[in-house]
Image (cartoon, grey):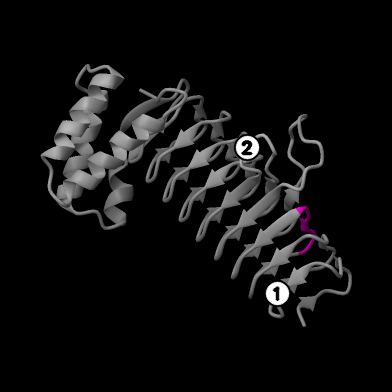
Amino acid sequence: MALIHPSAIVDPRAQLDSTVEIGAYSIVGPDVRIGARTVVGPHVVIEGHSTIGEDNKFFQFSSIGAAPQDKKWAGEPTRLEVGDRNTVREFCTFNLGTAQDAGVTRLGNDNWISAYVHLAHDCQVGSNTIFSNNAQLAGHVIVGDWAILSGYVGVHQFCKIGAHAFIGMYTSLTQDVPPFVLVSGNPAGARGVNIEGIKRRGFTRPQIDAIRVAYKLVYRSGLTLEEAKTALAEAEAGGDDESAPQLRAFREFLGTASRGIVR
């Protein structure tokens, strides 16, 4: 049997692994599934059609799987999916998806989500990300693996943040951020490559050099975005097994940028 505090309210239809822990005064709704060894602290509400994976830790006063803050939502059975080994600190709010998008909000694996973070409806967050206190995502935002959002970052709806990007404190994002790029300020501006981040993750010198080439083509060569895409494709074609994938990641991201990129 799951370890459930006597003051917690867990709907009998909820599906909890026998190793789950539910803290004092927490509430778990009927359409919730929680995987092995996940710990739900005190005063947490998990509701809606929410699936929580294994080895997660939810700290007190978070609201997980509540209705989306979208006037178009009409009670459709949309979902929230949380992967494995995530840390979710105090007062976080993760909302369900909407029928107007994929119908699901997702958080991947091994993420560190600090206090007061908001994941709005239909957000898609990858794995190994870090969200500092009060980072806020509007609806339909996509965040790639290993991205870092500093404190008080605000992201406009439908924006995309590429893998390994770094967003500085208090930045307000209204455009997309390519992978590997460090962005900060208001208005937001590209400040260089997230060198420290990619070094810590074991990128080799040829890989880092390729990322720097991509950055220079987009941000330092005076090219239009379309010209930069062509230049990246040419550099990729002439690259080797280490450099070409980094150039490709940059080029492919530019091909999906729907709001323009921070430049």
* Numbered tag placed on residue 152 in the rendering: none
Q: Is residue 225 magenta?
A: no
Q: Where residue 186 sits in the image (x, y, percent)?
A: 47, 22
Q: Is residue 47 magenta?
A: yes
Q: Main secondary structure of the magenta part?
A: loop
Q: Where residue 232 sits in the image (x, y, percent)?
A: 21, 32
Q: Residue at the bottom extreme?
A: 1
Residue 233 appears in the picture as rendered: yes
For the N terminus, the quadrant is bottom right
Q: Is residue 176 above or below residue 120?
A: above
- Marks 2, 1: nearer the viewer: 2
Badge 1 is on which residue?
20
Along the line of sight, the residue nearer the viewer: 48 or 161: 48
Q: Amino acid at mark 2?
A: Asp
Q: Where residue 146 sits in the image (x, y, percent)?
A: 41, 50
Q: To which quarter of the image does residue 179 belong?
A: top left
Q: Earlier in the sequence, mark 2 or mark 1?
A: 1
Q: Within 10 Å of the Cα at label 1, are there few (<14), some (14-19), or many (20+) other Cα atoms?
A: many
Q: Residue at x 30, y 21 (%)?
A: 225
Q: Residue at x 23, y 18 (%)?
A: 223
Q: Amino acid at mark 1?
A: Val
Taking the image as shown, residue 219 lies to the left or right of residue 52, namely left
Magenta residue span: 42-48
Q: Is residue 192 above or below residue 144?
A: above
Badge 2 is on which residue?
101
Residue 150 appears in the picture as rendered: no
